[in-house]
Image: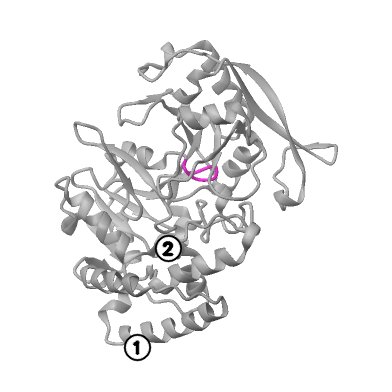
Amino acid sequence: MVDVILGLQWGDEGKGKIVDYFAKDYDLIARFQGGPNAGHTLYVGDDNKKVVLHQIPSGVFHQGTVNLIGNGVVLDPVTLKREYDTVESFGVDLKKNLFISERAHLILPTHRALDKAAELSKGNDKIGSTLKGIGPAYMDKTGRNGIRVGDLLHKSFTTSYIKLRLKHQRLLDNFNFDEDISVWEEEFFEAIEFLKTLNIVNGEYFINDHMDKGKKVLAEGAQGSMLDIDFGTFPFVTSSNTISSGVCNGLGVAPQKIREVIGVSKAYCTRVGGGPFPTELEDETGELLRKTGSEFGATTGRPRRCGWMDLVALEYACMLNGVTQIVMTKADVLDAFEELKICTEYEINGRQMKQVPFQMNHSKIKPIYRDFRGWNTQTSSYRDPSALPQEMKTYIDFINNSLRSQVHYISNGPNRDQIIKLGLS
């Protein structure tokens, strides 16, 4: 069977730590979608050293755990090589425990150039792309032009690369993009030679063989549900299916194999880049959330937009994913607040509703809030749920009573041991 961990908001929910926390109970951890725009932050070792993983699954620091980069991922060989070296510096033997699906598509240097050229051409209508080449790589995948990891092992790779590069160059000419990307290409081909030395496997057989042998599998998602290409705040979304159904086509597993869906949500909301954000706080409170929560992108370093918890969006994400339990992260960030708010409904054109509209940026959304007293006390050292302040219990109980799923865990700090199991059945 496969359990899933994924984000329920606009990404940056702290999934890396949560995957790392659960990974000890699994035999195989598999990334099923996204690219190097993911930034999963872990604190590892006795000195809690910070590591940000972009493509390698977050279970990699657990001895004996096998890690798979699935076919639904778009892979940047340069980023992978850099990340590989970082992980190995901690004494992890990736030659033994990292495997890559031969069906995963590659991000080429010209994909990065196209990403940058397209975003620059949009002017004030930018979607907030991380400029990693992910969107163009997925476009070539759906356009049946892409190059996959398995193609590296065949003589036709060079011919395929040249053909695709020429196609990309014509597009870049239309954008009047004339930046020199020769350095990118040099790094790319060095990384390609490195990639050939890794464990390239038929991912769907690999993961199903593990399940047939009774091995426990954990699927790791990137980004968040509100960035899903179909169900997110389009067009301000990522280029893949970030919800639980993406596990099936991103790894090659059947729907009935999915068991637990563990959704990760912050105790408030954040978003990086453009797009609608109904509960955004563009005031001193929003700035305090950003400062207290160190809300800056792990991949881009961009300041995150911050706002109150949005139950309309959260219930939508729980519905889409079939969430069976929620992990609430960064609860300790709210320690600093005397008053808290939770959005329970949207008001659009004078009408209150509990549904996410078709196109958020076509509607002026007024969030309807429920007020709560803050606990205004330091909670990051707590490990026993019974010791939590009553105000925090009231806050969580309200969320649980409003959703089709419940909060089973609270993360109250960045370190591995800073997590509280609430003991719900």
Is 9 contained in the magenta span? Answer: yes
x, y percent for residue 54: 36, 53
The residue drawn where x is 25% and y is 79% is: 153
Residue linked to disc 1: 159
Residue 312: give its label. none
Residue 72: give its label. 2
Main SS of residues in magenta: loop
Seen from the viewer's position, the closer of residues 120 and 33 is 120
Mark positioned earlier in the residue sequence (2 or 1): 2
x, y percent for residue 341: 63, 24
**Mark pair 2, 1: CA separation:** 24 Å
In the depicted structure, whether residue 68 falls above or below residue 364: below
Q: Nearer the viewer, mark 2 or mark 1?
A: 1
Inspect this view and state whether residue 217 appears.
yes
Q: Quadrant of residue 343?
A: top right
Inspect this view and state whether residue 1 appears.
no
In the depicted structure, whether residue 1 falls above or below residue 75: above
Drawn side of residue 178 relative to residue 363, left or right: left
Is 124 contained in the magenta span? Answer: no
Seen from the viewer's position, the closer of residues 43 and 215 is 43
The residue drawn where x is 23% and y is 44% is: 61
How many residues crowd around disc 1 within 10 Å: few (fewer than 14), some, or many (20 or more)?
Answer: few
x, y percent for residue 214: 28, 50
Drawn side of residue 175 relative to residue 364, left or right: left
How many residues crowd around disc 2 within 10 Å: few (fewer than 14), some, or many (20 or more)?
Answer: many
x, y percent for residue 152: 28, 77
Q: Secondary structure at mark 2?
A: loop
Seen from the viewer's position, the closer of residues 61 and 289 is 289
The residue drawn where x is 31% and y is 30% is: 415
Q: Which residues are magenta?
A: 7-12
Seen from the viewer's position, the closer of residues 262 and 126 is 126
Numbered label tally:
2
